[in-house]
Amino acid sequence: MRVLVADILSPDPAAPQRGSFVRDQVAALRRAGVEVEHASFPTGKRHYPHAVRGLRRLTKDGSFDVVHAHYGLVGWFALPAGARPLVVTFHGTDVRHPVVGWMSRRLVGRLDLVGAASEALFEPESGRPGLPRPPGRSAVLPVGVALDRFAPRPRAESRRRLGLDPGGRYLLFPADPGRPVKRHDRAAEVAGRCGAELLVAGSLDPDAMPDWVNAASAVLVTSENEGFGLAALEALACDVPVLSTPVGIAPTALADVDGCLCTPFDAAAWAKLADEHLASEDPRIEGRARAEGYSTDRMAERLIEAYREVLALNASPRAERPRAAR
């Protein structure tokens, strides 16, 4: 099977972590024996015409069995390039955004497979509709956690590598504080109540992220919504406690994991549990076994099966292809 994976998530010095979850998925697909070409274009409006031209050049000879775009906007770029059969994974911002969300819902009827990073994206949220779910042409396709990178490490060693105080009180906010939906203000309030320093992982090298997770006594996911919520799984893979709002995968991933919390934000309740973890020399939970169920390799297996179903549907003479963009 030969697959073209496309995104507009090229990393740069200011955002080295951008698109790392797609690169992890591509690596898992290759380990599974899929021949993958990965076309990653820079983000930003001025780069969009280049993305369309680049995809047209890559797909013109029809040598790919499947084209897989990440984010709805990339799907719109792939359509005029003649990319078929076309799978799009929607990740959250492309569904919940007041403008881009409308475009994503319009795109659904033109796709061979509608993929969502989590079940939650097919449901309404905060007064905004979820993705339409065409019968027989939709699937939940998470990207998965890279267990080879995210694993328990001695807290003292992680703090030493990062230049942190060995005896410091640290909580981790694993997101860009400049994104309002992530609610950095909530995490800062919890840290303030605990007398802890809030570490912020907005623009870190993906290879450094496991040390930041292991250096913290707990990870705070305070988001208003998440398409998937990979940060919670990365913390679980490191056996680090997670406190999360009930967004994305969190209600399922954190259920019945002692030491974790998945409830609507309550600063006092969150601070109480966070303070208990901060008081421990090296608080750990039994989270890795839960994270293993969402590994990049397992999610790649699910994705390959989805590709096969798309190919089988398109091979059927009775299959009705989605209409092309006009």
Image (tube, helix red, strand yellow):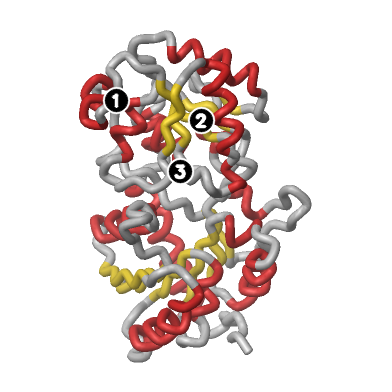
**Residue at the image point whose x is 59% and y is 86% from the top:** 324
Q: Quadrant of the N terminus?
A: bottom left
**Residue 267 or 145: which is nearer the viewer?**
267
Amino acid residing under circle 2: Leu
Amino acid residing under circle 3: Leu
Label 3, label 1: how far apart the Cα atoms are: 25 Å
* Percent coordinates x, y for residue 120 in the rendering: 63, 48
Quarter of the image for residue 136 reads bottom right
* Percent coordinates x, y for residue 226 in the rendering: 57, 46
Left or right of 324: which side holds 210? left
Left or right of 183: which side holds 240? left
Judged by depth in the image, the label closer to the viewer, 3 or 1, is: 1
SS at mark 1? Answer: loop
Q: Earlier in the sequence, mark 2 or mark 1?
A: 1
Examine the rendering and report whether any part of residue 25 can be seen. Answer: no
SS at mark 2? Answer: strand
Quarter of the image for residue 235 reads top left
> Residue at label 3?
230
Amino acid residing under circle 1: Leu
> Residue at label 2?
220
Quarter of the image for residue 269 reads top right
* Percent coordinates x, y for residue 282 in the rendering: 34, 14
Categorize mark 1 by other alpha carbons within 10 Å: few (<14), some (14-19), many (20+). some
**Residue at the image point whose x is 46% and y is 86% from the top:** 81
**Residue at the image point whose x is 29% and y is 54% from the top:** 28
**Residue 167 or 311: which is nearer the viewer?**
167
* Percent coordinates x, y for residue 193 in the rendering: 57, 17
Tell me the number on the disc at residue 67: none
> Residue at label 1?
164
Tell me: residue 271, above or below residue 27: above
Left or right of 57: which side holds 154? left
